[in-house]
Image (tube, helix red, strand yellow):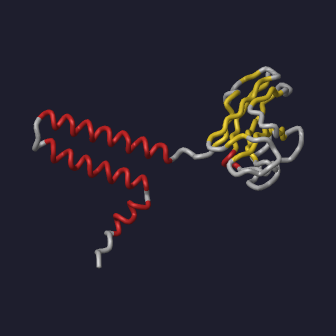
């Protein structure tokens, strides 16, 4: 019968961030011992390996905070002043753009909400002048608005126009002159 792992190792195994730092700790600990017991070349090599491991560990930690799926407004920029009509370009990460109709996993189409909050996950995006639908799979459009300040929200939804929720929306503010 084998011994049970120490409780702190079980926690590290379930947490990728802690695991990365645990590996870096072990590498740096080994590096510290190696520096005093090897030649100049070995020290430099060991420091280079430790530096690379640290960089990879930190890069891995940074990417863990990025969402796997996201929608964005590529154009105009948040806070931009534009003349009407102006171009709006949508972006998507981790999903495919498809025409409305069939519900296919990890796909959908864009909607532009004008001065409206993101649509709750699972609710249908209304058809109105403030909820523009791009059910043919369009990723850009020209928008005409009267002068003023507007909140524009890109909302991604499935083939039946059911919203993927606030996590798949992005809101910016523009001033139309």
Give how far across and how far down residue 64 sits, in percent. 49, 47
Left or right, 35 with reference to 153: left
- Name the image quarter holding residue 53: top left
Which quarter of the figure is the N terminus placed in? bottom left
Taking the spot 78% from the left edge, 30% from the top edge, the residue there is 149
* Residue sitting at the far bottom: 1
Which quarter of the figure is the C terminus placed in? top right
Give how far across and how far down residue 51 sits, in percent. 29, 38
Taking the spot 43% from the left edge, 61% from the top edge, the residue there is 14
Taking the spot 88% from the left edge, 44% from the top edge, the residue there is 127
* 105 or 113: nearer the viewer: 105
Q: Is residue 35 above or below residue 77?
A: below
- Name the image quarter holding residue 85: top right
Give how far across and how far down residue 19 sits, in percent. 38, 55
Give how far across and how far down residue 20 sits, in percent. 37, 50
Left or right, 91 with reference to 49: right
How many labels were placed on the picture? 0
- Name the image quarter holding residue 97: top right
Left or right, 160 with reference to 169: right
């Amino acid at each position: 019968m084998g011994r049970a792992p120490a409780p702190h190792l079980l926690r590290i195994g379930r947490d990728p961030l802690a695991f990365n730092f645990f590996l870096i700790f072990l590498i740096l600990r080994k590096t510290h011992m190696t520096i005093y017991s090897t030649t100049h070349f070995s020290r430099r090599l060991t420091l280079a390996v430790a530096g690379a491991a640290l960089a990879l560990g930190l890069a891995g930690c940074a990417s863990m905070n990025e969402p796997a799926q996201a929608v964005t407004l590529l154009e105009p920029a948040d806070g931009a002043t534009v003349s009407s009509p102006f171009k709006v370009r949508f972006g998507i990460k981790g999903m495919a753009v498809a025409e409305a109709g069939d519900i296919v996993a990890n796909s959908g189409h864009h909607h532009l909400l004008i001065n409206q909050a993101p649509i709750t996950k699972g609710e249908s995006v209304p058809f109105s002048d403030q909820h523009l639908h791009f059910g043919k799979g369009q990723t850009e459009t020209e928008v005409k608005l009267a002068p003023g300040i507007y909140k524009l929200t890109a909302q991604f939804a499935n083939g039946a126009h059911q919203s993927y929720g606030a996590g798949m929306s992005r809101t910016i503010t523009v001033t139309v002159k």
